[in-house]
Image: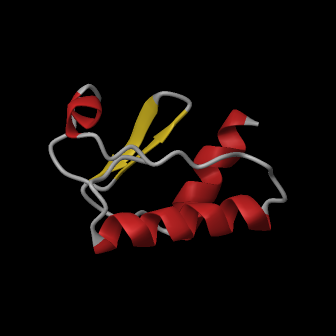
Amino acid sequence: MLGPGCAKCDRLEKKVKKVINELGLKDEVIKVKDITKIMEYDIIMTPALVIDGEVKSAGRIPAKDEIKKWIDLRT
């Protein structure tokens, strides 16, 4: 998860953690706040969701179903 710690970033983090919990997974959510590291992902807006090194969304909070689909595709 990429974001400086704004309210939207916090909402995305909570939503992702909820999805992980609902799926019964033990995955860790890593929150990157360092602007230099965020810029390495070549995104324009935060919050952004990165799964296994791939940016899945940026500048919005994706729907729970989208997040589930992205997580399910990697398992």
* Whether residue 11 is situated above or below residue 44 in the rendered picture: below
How many numbered markers are drawn? 0
Q: Could you tell me which residue is drawn at 65 percent across and 69 percent down? A: 18
Camera-side residue: 8 or 66?
A: 8
Q: Is residue 26 left or right of residue 38?
A: right
Residue drawn at x 39%, y 43% as measured from the top left: 32
User: In the depicted view, which residue is nearer to us: 2 or 60?
Assistant: 2
Instruction: Give residue 2's position: percent from left, percent from top.
Output: 36, 46
Query: Quarter-wise, where is residue 16 in the image?
Result: bottom right
**Residue lying farthest right?**
24
| Left/right of residue 41 with respect to residue 72 in the rendered view | left
Where is residue 7? Give x, y as percent. 31, 74
Residue at the image point whose x is 27% and y is 36% from the top: 38
Residue lying at 42% horizontally and 63% vertically, measured from the top left:
62
Q: Relative to residue 5, is residue 54 depicted above or below?
A: above
Residue 57 at x, y percent in the picture: 36, 48
Quadrant where the C terminus is found in the figure: top right
